[in-house]
Image (spheres, rainbow, N blue to C red):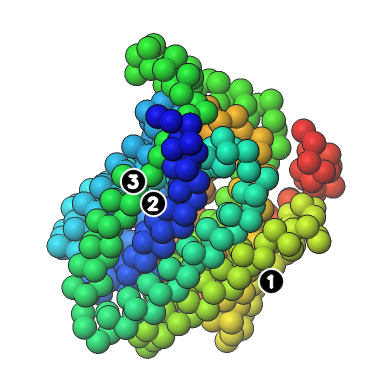
Amino acid sequence: MEPEIHTKKLYSNITKNYIFLGLTTLDLTRGLWMIFLFSRGFSLIELGILEGVFHLTTFVMEIPTGIVADLWGRRLSRLLGRIIFLISLGIMFWSYSFTLQLIGFIITAIGYNLESGAGEALLYDSMKELGIEEQYKKTAGKNNFVDWMGGILSFLIGGYFAVHLGYTWVFIPSMIICIISIFVTYSMHEPSLTQHEQIRLRKMGWIKAMGVQTIESLKVVKERPKIAFLILFSELIFMFLTSLFFYLQTYWKGNGWDEFQIGMVLAGSGLLSAIAGLTGHRIEKKIGEKGVLLIAPLLLIITLWGIALTPYAPFFFIITGLIDGLLYVAIQDYINKMIPSERRATVLSFQSMTFSFYMIIFFPAVGFFGDRYGLEYSFLGLAVIGTVMYGFYTIHHNLNRDVSLDGSD
């Protein structure tokens, strides 16, 4: 391919990625699947098991799918992920069996794995090959803005359709949008930075290549301990935010809220996240990495206690959008700068793997206590656990300032 054409296609990846994110986040089931299954008679424990199995699958499959992206291409990995997600939507909508839903969640997890690190690696390495990777933080902020604006629309439209038209009008449009996103993914262009390493590893055969890629990626993390710190720190916060996101929906539904009202609150949080993501690079410039890593967990503790002990849970949940938007943009930029291109998707898989590990432990436990004692006590438990963990975090911060905050290893 002519160099000029190759360069133009790499630039087009940035624009197409915005379109892709807009389509994938315009998933009308995004804020409703838990309410949908709950309305079909699934208990909170069963929903907790489904989500736990989802994250158990992502935990097991993250590294293999990350290797697929690094060895066989990020575009191919993302394309397979979209196709699998389309299949999983059909299973969720047309199945009433817990066993089939379980299979559907396993399939969904594999699709998520194939997309998770691949898309970000494709974008970052496109920018790196173009020599504009210093603009990634700003681009990541725009991505987060597009992501949440799509999410806001999905919450509002999905909630309205669910209340006034029924869930058929939630799932079928989502499937159509997913098909369009498949075509957008197919039109994207693979960066060439990792081409030689891909050829070298593929010659070894699938099994040996997986082993070598895993070992080399672990070496990257071992040589740069700050990567491990940032992953463990950020994914713990995202676990708390995700648990609140899903269980508050069920809690409000049980208190007489309809899907549109719930969607309004989710949209409010999404809007704040979108604004924080868009302006995150400016905020981070003013408060620095140290400020980001200290303010985010402190805000989380405040919101957890506000949700658990006050009647203003919707307000405090909306505030969580600020944590999500600010932390996502900053952390992804910090981590990507430290990862070699040929290991990027695999190392980013470690990040998703960590999130899944946290969710396997906490998410079913929240559902169990919610079923047995009421979700109010689950939220209180999250606040207590979060506060204790924040105490350990501050101790770690005081003992390891050089590794965690100043940008050195």
Where in the figure is residue 352, as x and y percent of width and height?
A: 49, 44
Q: Extreme top residue here?
A: 204
SS type, badge 1? helix
Within 10 Å of the Cα at label 1, are there few (<14), some (14-19), or many (20+) other Cα atoms?
A: some
Where in the figure is residue 333, as x and y percent of width and height?
A: 64, 47
Look at label 2 and name its amino acid.
Answer: Gly
Instruction: Calculate the distance from the C-alpha at mark 2 to the C-alpha at mark 1.
Output: 26 Å
> Mark 2 = which residue?
52
Query: Looking at the picture, does residue 57 appear above or below residue 212?
Result: below
Residue at 24% of width from left, 68% of height from top?
173
Pick the front one: 276 or 42: 276
Query: Looking at the picture, does residue 362 appear above or below residue 372?
Result: above
Dot 2 and dot 3 residues touching (CB under 8 Å): no
The image quadrant of residue 409 is: top right
Residue at 69% of width from left, 71% of height from top?
302
Instruction: Calculate the distance from the C-alpha at mark 3 to the C-alpha at mark 1.
Output: 44 Å
SS type, badge 3? loop
Pick the front one: 27 or 318: 27
> Mark 3 = which residue?
187
Pick whichever of labels 2 and 1 is earlier in the sequence: 2
> Mark 1 = which residue?
302
The answer to whether residue 43 of the structure is visible from this angle is: no
